[in-house]
Amino acid sequence: TLWDAAMAGDRELLERLRWAGVQAVLGEAAVRQTLAESPIGRPDAIVAGGKAAASMAKAAVNTFGADLPCLVLTKYGHAAGAGLPPGVDVIESAHPVPDTQSLLAGKRLLQTVASMAEGSHLLLLVSGGASALVEVPEEGWTLEMLAAENARLLAAGLDIHMMNRRRSEFSQIKGGRLLAAFRGAQVTTFAISDVEGDALGVIGSGIGAAPPNPGFQHDARIVASNAIARAAVARAAEAEGLAVLRSDEVLYADIGDAAGRIAATLDGTPGLSIFGGEPTTVLPDSPGEGGRNQALALTLAERIAGREGVMALVAGTDGSDGPTTAAGGIVDGQTWGVDARQSLARADSGTYLATRGELFVSGPTGTNVMDVQIVLLVE
């Protein structure tokens, strides 16, 4: 039908705009551009941790040479396709709940940093996800305890600042403690921000932050952020002839509040609204399939139910949403149906969206700057 054709065209448009935003903050491009605009001295080693670690490391290795020691610690499946040279040491582990590989990655990370010689220079590349991907627990903390506590924090609806503050309490490497083991002369930290306020002490639970009174020179830079991604979406939208109505990084509330905030802006004015942030949700016991973006997409679908000419793409910029392989969902006024409320209550929004063909799946992107929500309202 004409309606289906119009909706298909709008979906393709939203996917193009989202990709424009992601491209602007890809790890490889962000690191390459930063090194070109503000060169640093050749480091003695490169260490990259987080969901964007492989992409970030590729730019650094291409700049400084494949002969440099390089350690990449990332999520399962996120190093494949990055084009890293054979000499790069890669350890993949679990996210958002740590596993045995996370402990192996943490041990290697701490050993690498602590073993660097006096006078040495470390290039540390940090992106979101490192909190679970690398860990050295305090004495007395078992993997089972770590996993249970992380699962509890994830289910409690806490924001990332509160979660990472708690995570630092039982870690030997978070909150600046990793670099306390560094005995060299200089650390350069490049970080892709996935936190509100772009606080280095919160990104990756602060593995790239310096300890108090460091005995080395520390140069830290934010190389990509949600604001940069949203600006790229806006430029791409304007190039498509769309009016950009707003671009706000405000979605840090519970998904119900976040959906209400988005819906309240749909006052009938045609154009594109862009939102950023990382909303929270409280999970029930034994949750179903889905993540916060899929839950927010379905919650928003209720707010726009029955409306024509409204479509929203809600997705994580890293290409994943919680423990799922989807990045989020694409919903419109026809999405909300009879089983939707029960699906939300069971935290099973992914299953509901999948049955309707409204999951958004992109695969790992090579970056992580929180979530982007793009809402199109046509006449």
Image: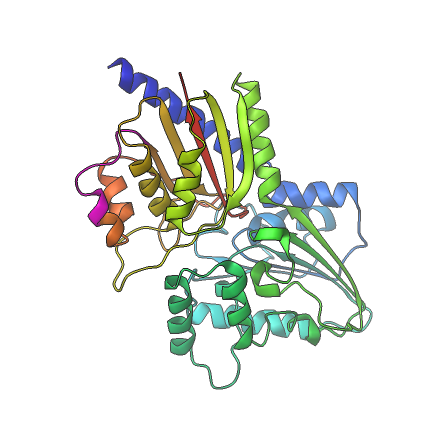
What residue appears at the point 52 percent right and 85 percent down from the top-left corner? Answer: 139
The image shows residue 11 at horizontal and vertical percentages of 38, 26
The outermost residue toward the bottom is 140
Report the side of 73 relative to 374 (left or right): right
The magenta span reads: 332-342
| Vertical position of residue 29 compared to residue 266: above or below | below
Quadrant of the image containing the C terminus: top left
The structure's colour scheme is rainbow
Q: Determine whether 40 is above or below 18 in the image.
A: below
Per the picture, the main secondary structure of the magenta-coloured stretch is: loop
Residue 374 point in image, percent of width and height: 46, 33
| Whole-percent x, y for residue 337 in the image | 20, 37
From the viewer's side, name the closer residue of 105 and 361. Answer: 361
**For the N terminus, which image quadrant?**
top left
Q: How many marks on residues?
A: 0
Residue 228 drawn at (x, y percent): 62, 39
Q: Is residue 254 magenta?
A: no
Q: Pick whichever, 361 or 65, lies toward us.
A: 361
Visible residue check, residue 76: yes
Choose top left, top right, bottom left or bottom right for residue 7: top left
Q: Quadrant of residue 285?
A: bottom left
Q: Is residue 25 visible?
A: no
What residue occupies the far left of the structure in this picture? 338
- The residue at the point 34 percent across, 47 percent down is 295
At x 59% / y 58%, what residue is drawn? Answer: 203
Residue 138 against residue 122 in the figure, above or below = below
